[in-house]
Structure formats: structure tokens, C-alpha cells
Amino acid sequence: MDRALSRKGEKQAAAMSSWLNGRLPENTQILCSPSRRTLQTVAFLKRSYQVCEEVSPDANAGALLKAARWPHCPSAVLVVAHQPFLAETVEHLLNLHPAKPLSFRKGGIWWLRHRNQDGVSDVALVGVINPEILI
């Protein structure tokens, strides 16, 4: 909970924040773990955010989805949090059952979109961006 970002982590957080700020709606709800590294990361966005215990390192997919009000939140939601529950959440939302858990790179973004068409709920993977692509 008390580990700080490395210089590389700061560089990655700045690059990812710049990329996100060019794409996220102004009314995006941002949930951030109370850990030092995530608080340092979210600060690069220069947007308001909510420190959320439900996305702390020992959280789970159910707690994250409840905190984000998925799929009923009227705005986009950005979660700045930890592994392994971020990968578990993506696996759950995309209805995946991998033999091995999904792998997330530190500082990476998995962008998911929910839509309801003709009464059918659908979750799509819009994209995956890793910091190395932007630096």
C-alpha cells in the first residue's frame, strides 16, 4: 500500500493519462484504490476522482462492479486499481474461461463497453493499450 511509483512508472502514468484525457468524456467517473502508487498514477489525469476501498489490492470483481455501478452507471467509469482482480473482472464481463488467468501489464488499459440492444446485454472489448506503445 505504501510503495511509490518508480521513475519508469511515473513516465508510463504520464503517457497513459495523456492518451486517456484525449478520449475520455469529461463526466467520466474515476475510482481509485487508496494505495500510494494508484494515487500517484491517477494524479497525472488532473481530474477529480474518488478513493474507493472497493478497488483496493484485496478487492474482487464483484466489489469493483458494484462500486462502478456496472452496467447501470450513466457515465464512463475508469478504475485505477490492481491485479489479479482487474483481470478477473475482465474475464467475468467477457464471459471468458481461460485455462490460465489473463495477464495485465503494469500501467495497461483494458477498455470495455457495455450496450443493450433489443433487450440483450452485450460487453465488447474496445481495446488494450500498454504503456510501451505510447512512450
Image: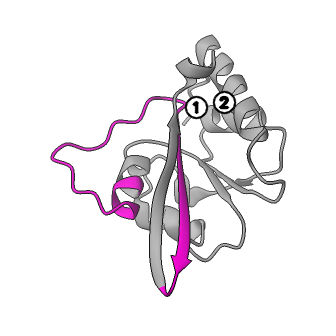
Q: Name the residue that disc number 2 marks.
A: 16
Residue in front for this viewpoint, 84 or 20:
20
Left/right placement of residue 38 relative to residue 45 reads left
Q: Residues within 10 Å of mark 1 (few under 14, many from 20)?
A: few
Mark 2 secondary-structure assignment: helix
Instruction: Please report the bounds of the magenta region as a residue range.
Output: 90-119
The residue sitting at 78% across, 38% down in the picture is 22
What amino acid type is highlighted by mark number 2? Met
Residue tagged 1: 2
Residue 41 at least partly seen: yes
Secondary structure under the numbered disc 1 in the rendered image: loop
Number of numbered discs on residues: 2
Q: Is residue 87 magenta?
A: no
Query: What residue is at 63 percent from the left and 46 percent from the top?
Result: 34
Instruction: Specify whether residue 40 is in view.
Output: no
- x and y, in percent, of residue 63 in the image: 48, 66
